Structures are given as C-alpha cells and as structure tokens.
Amino acid sequence: MIDILKKKVALSALKYISRNSIIGIGSGSTMKYFIKALSSIRSLIIGAVASSIQSYNYLRKLNIPIIELNNLNSVIDIYIDSADEVNNNLEMIKGGGGALTREKIISSASKKFLCIIDESKYVKILGISFPLPIEVIPMALKFVSQELRKLGGIPKFRRNFVTDNGNFIIDVFNLQIYQPVFLEKYINNIPGVVCVGLFAIRKANTLLISDINGVRKII
Ligand code: 5RP
C-alpha cells in the first residue's frame, strides 16, 4: 500500500515541472518513482541535478540530462524530494537513505523545495518515531556520540554504511524536536558533524501528501 501511495504522490509532482527548468533531484524510493515519471517529459527540461550516486545512476539510465552543481550558471528552479518525517510547519527529518548532506546542499541551492510524502510520514512532533540521522567524519564518531547523549538522545552507529562522501551516519533515537531550527544549528556546530538531517532552516515550500483518497497540498 505504501508503495502505491509513494507512486501516487510522485506522479502528482510532475505538474510542478515547468518547461526549460532545472530540477534538483532527491533520493530514495519515492524519488525513484518520480525520476521514472520525469523521464516521460525529459525533453521539456534543461536538466537535473542529482543528490546521490543512486539517483545519478537512475537519471542516467533513463537518459535524463544531468548537470553537475559546480557547472551550473543559473539557479536550480525546483528541488523535489521525499522525507522521513514532516511536521505541519514543513520542517523535516531526512537521511533515512543517508544522502542528507548532498540533499541539503541541493535543496539550499534551489528556488523552491517541493516535498512529496505518503501520509505515514506526516507527524506532529519530529524525532519521536524516526531517529535523526547525522553524517559525521569517521574519526569523530565517539566524540559526536558523546555530545549527542548530552542532548538526551540515544545515538546509534549505522553499521555497514558509508555515505557518498565517505563518512559515517549516527541515527539518534529518543528525541522530541520542539525547536527544529535551534537543534539544527546546535548539532551542525558540533565539531565532526558534516550535516544533520534536520531540514528546518531550508524547509519545504510546498508539501504534497498522498493517502487513499488522493493527494493534498500544504503550503
Ligand atoms: C534519503 C532521504 C529520503 O528522502 C527519505 O529517506 C525517504 O525515503 P523513501 O522515499 O525511500 O521513503 O532523506 O536520504
């Protein structure tokens, strides 16, 4: 059922794509559905900027033109991505797939962020059901974990996983995130942290949520 809802919301995002635009592309299973849908209108867009090696490879496989962020002379028109949790202020937890750092870079380099989720990810308080992913420099794993414990979190090293940037992920359980912007800044300031999977400073502009009745939009 979840897969049907992911596909439904991914298809509904197509109407947000304008002719001759540059699209930032997120990562994960919902985005796989979106990339597939995007391939049907690939000739209308200038190109796509990928946020992970996985999305890059899939864009390539479907012959969608790819642009490197460093080669862009203009701004990315719209960033499209899913999330692990979203609250009603359109702040998010992302990074379940471990691509959070590049996702944050590309979303921050985009004019608009369209987030697409199924209803299971729409929550009142971030961090209760889904742990907060944090990308860290490998040699700082222990130090960063100790700092996160001071916040009341339970940090867990994501085993057998290395990010596209060659770093590790810590998933932090037991959080109730009432001040996402504050926590995002605080964790980003811990030495050794590359990026925290809280997207509150660069939150979504528009959220599409699919459920059995259809797709609703929140601005
Ligand atoms: C990857 C992400 C994804 O957007 C998030 O994990 C949701 O993935 P899916 O669409 O597979 O449920 O943040 O880093």
Image (cartoon, rainbow, N blue to C red):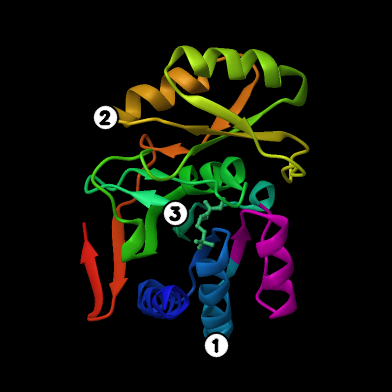
Name the residue nearer the viewer: 19 or 32: 32
At label 3, the amino acid type is: Ala
Q: Which mark is residue 40?
A: 1
- Image vertical order of residue 201 relative to residue 48, above or below: above
The boundaries of the magenta stretch are 48-68
| Residue 24 x/y as whole percent | 53, 59
Name the residue nearer the viewer: 97 or 59: 97
| Residue 151 x/y as whole percent | 43, 16
Which image quadrant for residue 156?
Answer: top right
Q: Which mark is residue 178?
A: 2
Local crowd at mark 1 within 10 Å, few (<14), some, or many (≥20)? few
Secondary structure, mark 1, is helix
Secondary structure, mark 2, is loop
Labels 3 and 1: the sequence-earlier one: 1
Local crowd at mark 2 within 10 Å, few (<14), some, or many (≥20)? few
Q: Which mark is residue 99?
A: none
| Residue 179 x/y as whole percent | 28, 27
In the shown orientation, is residue 140 left or right of residue 19?
A: right
Marks 2/3 in contact by CB < 8 Å: the verdict is no
The span from disc 3 to disc 1 (Cα, nearest Å) is 24 Å
